Every structure is written in C-alpha cells, then in structure tokens.
Image: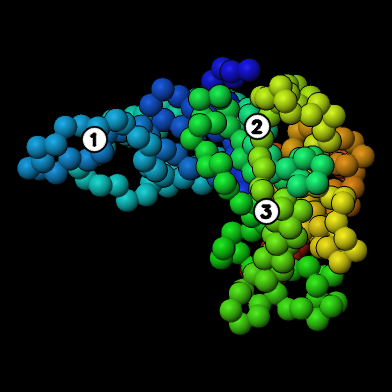
Amino acid sequence: MQEAPDSTFSIRRLNPFNGLLQVFELDAARALSANGQVWEIQVLSDSPQGLWANTPLGAQQYFTFGRWSETGGLKQVPVNPLFDIRTMIAASARLIESLQPVLNQLPFPMMDRHEQWLLDETGQQPLALLQSCRTETEMALYERTAQWIAAETEDGSFISSHLNQRGLPNHDGDNPRLHASILEAAVRHRAGSQYCTAWFYRNGENEMVPYKESQPQDLEFPELLLAESGYDAENAPLIEDYIAWKAPQFLMLPYISGECRERLEQLAVKQPEKIDRFWSLYPKIHNKDLLKRARVEARIRSANRN
C-alpha cells in the first residue's frame, strides 16, 4: 500500500476541509498553492545560527521564501539575514523555472490515499474523513482522537439558512461560529461516546481497503467526506447547508461521480468568486457554460468593488 513520492501531487486540506493543496517539489525547494495561481515558495535550509552560536546544525526544514504567480512574478518575504540568501535565491529560481512548464497539468494527481475515518456508533459506517496522508509511515504521526471540524475556530462564514429560519443567529455573543458548532455537535452525537476511528487505503478512485481484517467489508464511504444521510429531521437540513457552503471546494475532488459533480455545480454557482478562484483545480466540469457564467459574475462583482 506504500505510495511512492512524486514531484507533482495534491493532497486534501482536511479538518476542516478546504479543498486540495497543489504541491511541486524539487530536491531543495517546493511550491504550494491552494488555487493553482499563487504559489508559496519554500526553500529547504538549516536554521540560521547566531554569530556566537555553538549549537550543532539540526535537520534541514522548509522556510517560506516568497510568493510567486505567473502575472506578478516572485515577491520575496523578509528573510533572516543569517540565512544563506544566495543559495536560497538560486534554489527558488530553479524551482520556479521547473514549475512553469507543468502548470498546464493542473490539477496534480491526488496522492493522500491513506485515510482515517470517524465511524458511526450504531453501524460502524464511515461518518466523516478526519485525516489523510501519502504514506503508511505518516499514519503514526496523526492523533487518534482528532475531532471532526466543520470550520476553523476564527471562521464564522458558515451560515445555515435552516438555522436562520429557526431564529438561531450564527453569533450568539460568546460563539462567533455557532452554526458550525451545532453541525459539529450533530456529527459527534452520531459518533457516540466510544468515538471509533479506522484507517483505510483508497486503491484507485473508489475502492477502499481496510487495514484491519476484522473491519466490515460492506462499508459505504461518503463521496463528500461527510455522511449526508442518517440524521434526524432537525439536523438533516444542516448537513445540506454545509454541502452547499463547501460545494466550490468539493468540486476539486477527482473521484466524485458525474451526478454528484452536476449537483455540486448547481450549488457552487451561488458563490461565483470561489468558482473563479478554484477554476483551474477542477479535474472535470459537467456544465461549462454554467460555471463560465459564474466566473463572469465574479469578475463583474470584483470590478464593481474596485
């Protein structure tokens, strides 16, 4: 099940899900992008040593060197003068030169095929995807008790129309993301007090292989990383609101069915700016005219703001 490293790949940004991160690697540098347009340039280097430092050099690590785009070029961030700046400039230049010819291959193949799922308490069915990684070695680095998260702690942008209609505002004075908290509580309720998780390997697009032989084989994995059925009448509309909110990011997933992709496109056009931002990372498009109209709408809104 071990995946071989590759220089161009993508990984899902999970817990909370925020689309797919595009990665391009060379031996001494890498470029990361959440939208395929602006790339964070990171260079592998030793930590800078002070003038009178007598500590040995540790393992090298990545440091952010700048941000690059085809239209804006490289914009370098302030760098500690104790770094070997000349070497970092050379590494970033080689990286950018190698990156440009492969931009037409976006989106890069999804390589985080080792997946940790939260299981439903009653039927031990996959409930929510918690974490993923590229290799079996990385699996041991992840927490076993990670909670599923709908949105970042400071992100109050998920607003459920269902909860609004019930008279529950998203900000209650103490919690600026109340709707996300209610959704997370609904998922935790289904997971139960035992809170069981399991690792699986995505073999191909949709075949999921369990790591434990005792794991049931007849499992149904949610296409959109969170189970959409099995909730009570009070919480089912909340799940629908969440799927609609994340639709522009869910469209980046390469393995969803055509029917699911068509449904997501209809939901995503309500957020045209996000469609315009992530357009280059959609592996397939069902209704190109629909999404092109949404991009035009996004450009008009941007022009009006400016």
State which mark lies toward you, 3 or 2: 3
Residue at the far left: name it.
52
Disc 1 to disc 3, how far (Cα)?
52 Å
Q: Residues within 10 Å of mark 2 (few under 14, many from 20)?
A: many
Q: Which residue does the numbered mark 3 point to in the structure image? A: 193
Q: Is residue 125 left or right of residue 196?
A: right
State which mark lies toward you, 1 or 3: 3
Viewer-nearest residue: 18 or 213 = 213
Image position, residue 195 (x, y; %): 66, 48
Q: Secondary structure at mark 3?
A: loop
Q: Residue at x 14, y 44 (%)?
A: 50
Q: Which residue does the numbered mark 2 point to in the structure image? A: 199
| Mark 2: amino acid | Trp
State which mark lies toward you, 2 or 1: 2
Q: Residues within 10 Å of mark 3 (few under 14, many from 20)?
A: few
Quarter-of-image position of residue 55: top left
Viewer-nearest residue: 171 or 110 = 171
Q: Residue at x 11, y 41 (%)?
A: 53
Image position, residue 111 (x, y; %): 63, 27
Disc 2 to disc 1, how far (Cα)?
41 Å
Q: Which residue does the numbered mark 1 point to in the structure image? A: 84
Residue 145's disc is none
Q: Is residue 275 visible?
A: no
Q: Is residue 126 above or below residue 232?
A: above
Q: Which of the two discs, 3 and 2, labels the residue nearer the N terminus?
A: 3
Image position, residue 9 (x, y; %): 60, 28
Quarter-of-image position of residue 177: bottom right
Q: Secondary structure at mark 1?
A: loop
Q: Residues within 10 Å of mark 1 (few under 14, many from 20)?
A: some
Q: Secondary structure at mark 2?
A: strand
Q: Which of the two discs, 1 and 3, labels the residue nearer the N terminus?
A: 1
